[in-house]
Image (spheres, rainbow, N blue to C red):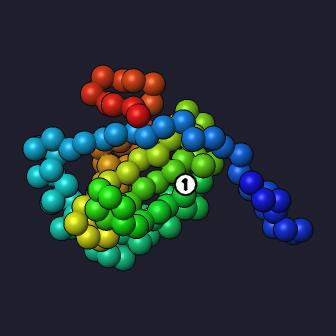
Amino acid sequence: MPKAAKGSPAQPKWSFKGFVRCELNKSEASDFKSWSDATTDLDLFCLVMELCDSGYKFSCGENAQGMGASLTNVEGPVDSRGYVLSAFAGDPNRAVRAVMYKHYVKCAAGWPVGGEEGWDLG
């Protein structure tokens, strides 16, 4: 990592540990739709900013799987530091909504790492 400029905070130290693959089942997909419909774009922006202020790196872009959004735990809770939670969709707004739903609702703001039942860690 490059050295931080004088007067700026030091870069966080973390290492990539893997992906938390978190798929929604049919019931959760229905819950996601209700949650997404009730979540305004401003709400969504505030959720993203809250996570960025709490030690997560947020990314959104297109790749071979479509439009994706991801959260990387860089300075957040120690037990899941280095893991990445992601979501893919046909458009960026839906991808961001999906990763926020996974973090705040399905994972209850705590990522299951260590192979808990029902979770597939990459």
**Which one is nearer the viewer's eye here, 63 or 115?**
63
Residue under numbered circle 1: 56
Up/down of 116 relative to 18, above or below: above
- Residue 109, quarter of the rendered image: top left
Q: Which residue is rendered at x = 25% and y = 42% of the image?
A: 23
Up/down of 104 relative to 40, above or below: above
Q: Amino acid at mark 1?
A: Tyr
- The quadrant in which the C terminus is found is top left
Residue sitting farthest toward the front:
64
Q: Which residue is rendered at x = 59% and y = 54% of the image?
A: 55
Question: Left or right: 101 with respect to 55?
Answer: left
x and y, in percent, of residue 94 in the image: 26, 66
**Which one is nearer the viewer's eye here, 61 or 13?**
61
Q: Which residue is rendered at x = 40% and y = 39% of the image?
A: 20
Query: Is residue 50 visible from the viewing direction of this image?
Result: no
Question: Left or right: 33 with respect to 63?
Answer: left
x and y, in percent, of residue 29 in the image: 15, 50
Instruction: Tally the marks.
Output: 1
